[in-house]
Image (tube, coloured by chain):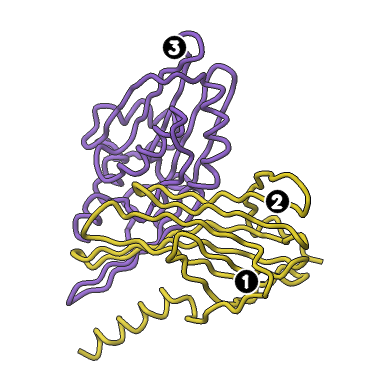
Chain colours: A yellow, B purple
Amino acid sequence: MIRRALVLCCAVLVAGCGGMRYTDVAEKNLAIRTETSSGSAFSSVKAVLGVHAVDAKCKLTYEGYVDLDRPLVQVGIPPGRLSYLVFEFASSSFLGGSRGSISQETLLRPHPGAIYDVKVTYKNELYEVAMRETPRGGRPRDIELVGLGACKGS
Amino acid sequence: MSSKLAVLGIVAILAGGCAGKMPQTADEFRQMAPGAFMVQVQGFEVKRSPREIGETFRRRAPECLNVTVRTTSQTATSYQVIDTAYKATVIAGSDKAELHLQQKHLKGVVAVYEEPADGHYLFVVDAVPAGARAAKVQIIGPSRGYDVVVRAIKAWADGSSTGCPDLTKIG
């Protein structure tokens, strides 16, 4: 019993990524549209955004998570500052007791006044994160997701 | 989970071939895999050129497939963790596109045979011309347990989706 409790405790800690909700800035510059479907009555999938601050040496500081549990979630990411966004899809099976998570990450330095539309989908066991930037008074453009490897520390 | 482990084990063993030698290159895999137990060769045509398919492979494969996946499974008596690294290689030209996917278990599964540095070959996909702006695509890979990867590769080839396969669904 104690062993099972410990295992469960560890699993919760791992899945929760620290368990701290992200406190965002007032200006909601990220509009995240999420569509998830596990494709099975015996399993579920949950999408979560993890937000990290990135310093000049490319060191990450975890700032918290945002549940992407509604079709549209708006989040404020500090403009002008480099952030590392981790879109995580956590799936679990009710029958087999198995869990898994997979994520798509990107560095983002939001331009002041710009709006970022993010489409997050998980369907038929295929997932995708697509991002579009609309600068203030400008035209929308698709932006590539950029991994942490692209961060050049000073 | 036992079925997942069984699939992983069988795929590793079958990739090793009957002679006990694991393919060390994509070409060796092409030669050894067809006809092997639990290996499937699928062929289909799409209305896209090999160049277009190669561009999609080049754009999506590294982002989607160069990942390390951790899967956990828990029963009343066990707790299993498997760490698996995947490595995709794309060779894209004007008249042929290739996608190779290698798999290396970092934790939780024992490698029976000597593997290539980036892991054993799991899939080798070739797209060659089949008339004007069409291609014949061949996927060589495991016959079961990897449906999600096959679905993604087919979707990339025919242009219907650019989504990444959830590699935690393997097995």
**Label 1 chain ID:** A
Residue positioned most to the top: B131
Which residue corresponds to mark 3? B130
Q: Quick one: SS at disc 2?
A: strand
The residue mark sitting in front, 2 or 1, is 2
Please determine whether, in this image, residue B159 is positioned above or below residue B106: above
Point 25% across, 63% down: residue: A93
Please determine whether, in this image, residue A108 is positioned above or below residue A23: above
Q: Quick one: SS at disc 3?
A: loop
Q: Residues within 10 Å of mark 2 (few under 14, many from 20)?
A: some
For residue A134, the mark is: 2
- Image quarter for residue B90? top right
Q: How crowded is mark 3: few (under 14 residues within 10 Å), some or many (20 or more)?
A: some
- Image quarter for residue A148? bottom right
Q: Which of A81 and A133 is in front in this view?
A: A133
Amino acid type, label 2 = Thr
